Amino acid sequence: MTMPAVRWGIIGCGDVTEVKSGPAFHRVDGSALVAVMRRDGDKARDYAQRHGVAKWYDDAAALIADKDVDAVYVATPPSTHHSYALMAIAAGKPVYVEKPMARDHAECRAILDAGRDAGVPVFVAYYRRCLPRFRKVRELLFERRVIGMPRIVNVVLYEPHHPRYQNPSELPWRVQPELAGGGLFMDLGCHTLDILDWLFGPIASASGHASNQLGAYPAEDCVAMSYVFGNGMLGTGLWNFAAQRHEDRVEVIGDGGRIVFATFGDGPIEVENSEGVHEYAVANPAHIQQPLIETIVAELRGQKGACPSMAESAARTGWVMDQVLRDYRRQTAQALG
């Protein structure tokens, strides 16, 4: 599948598309945003007018059927990723799905298999794989070998309980498991797990515990996990969304030092080894998904292997999260009867 240019349609033109992704479709060479869809037609029309998009829809099937739309970006909550991705694949149109790829590995697998069977590319918005700061981390680890051989990785993400999650009648979709597949671990933890997959290879085994300590919403708010990469490297992870303060840290310990960086934000990368402590500051681009979208457009225009975030790797991250949340999901289902 090779395209001279890629004309995009967005399903779900919400907040993530305002700055992070939407404008990039216009800015990438050989790419254009030609249509948007939202169930609220007034909001779809408003988005189209503000962003200079020619067409707007309030029906996803109509956007997918539009002959001027070559590829589809699904930017809805995870509960509809599966259905919209399958619709686009059935129409023979490449699909770019927001992260997490779906609510669980079974839905991820269905999308992956459908795309593979139809010969239709499926990309997933794990855009950190293309950000300059994570490319720098990879360079430091594997080209410059600043910490020697990586042996273990420790992940921590702590966040205070945010006021937006305090009204049970107006909970955002991110903490409603029927819409998100879980809670903030699904929404945020998936980014870290995916970047670890990109750096160190697939996680071969994972287990964990999850709990709901605040009772503010149905989803888990505290997660602890351990995991083993295919190369034998070990890892741990802690996520707490009812903490006193924010902390975001990925620490990789090697036999010659350590490297520390954050999944979110663009603070300095810190390296500590026998030569001392060094910091590397690498800023994020204005439209943070643009570097990944550039690779997607390049692949659709004939540069095979250009995009590093495909359905195969995204489904692996879905599988890892399933292992961690399996018991919590089962207990929650039993409690609901």
Image: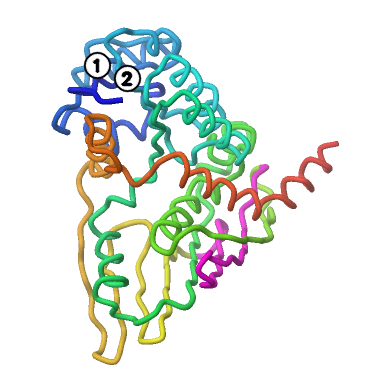
Which amino acid, by three-letter code, is at mark 1?
Val
Which amino acid, by three-letter code, is at mark 2?
Gly
Q: Residue furthest right?
A: 337
Magenta region includes residue 221: yes
Per the image, label 2 sits on a secondary structure element best described as strand
Q: Which numbered disc flags the more N-terminal residue, 1 or 2?
A: 2
Across and down, in percent, residue 307 comes to 31, 42
Callout 1 touching callout 2 (CB < 8 Å): yes
Residue, x 24% and y 64% (percent of image)?
Answer: 136
Cα separation, mark 1 vs mark 2, equals 6 Å
Across and down, in percent, residue 125 comes to 38, 40
Residue, x 45% and y 21% (percent of image)?
Answer: 89
Indicate which disc residue 34 carries.
Answer: 1
Q: Which residues are magenta?
A: 218-244
Colouring: rainbow
Q: Quadrant of the C terminus?
A: top right
Magenta region includes residue 245: no
Q: Quadrant of the N terminus?
A: top left
Indicate which disc residue 9 carries.
Answer: 2
Q: Where is residue 213, by image quadrant?
A: bottom right
Across and down, in percent, residue 114 comes to 52, 27
Q: How many C-alpha atoms fall within 10 Å of the one at disc 2: few (<14), some, or many (≥20)?
A: many
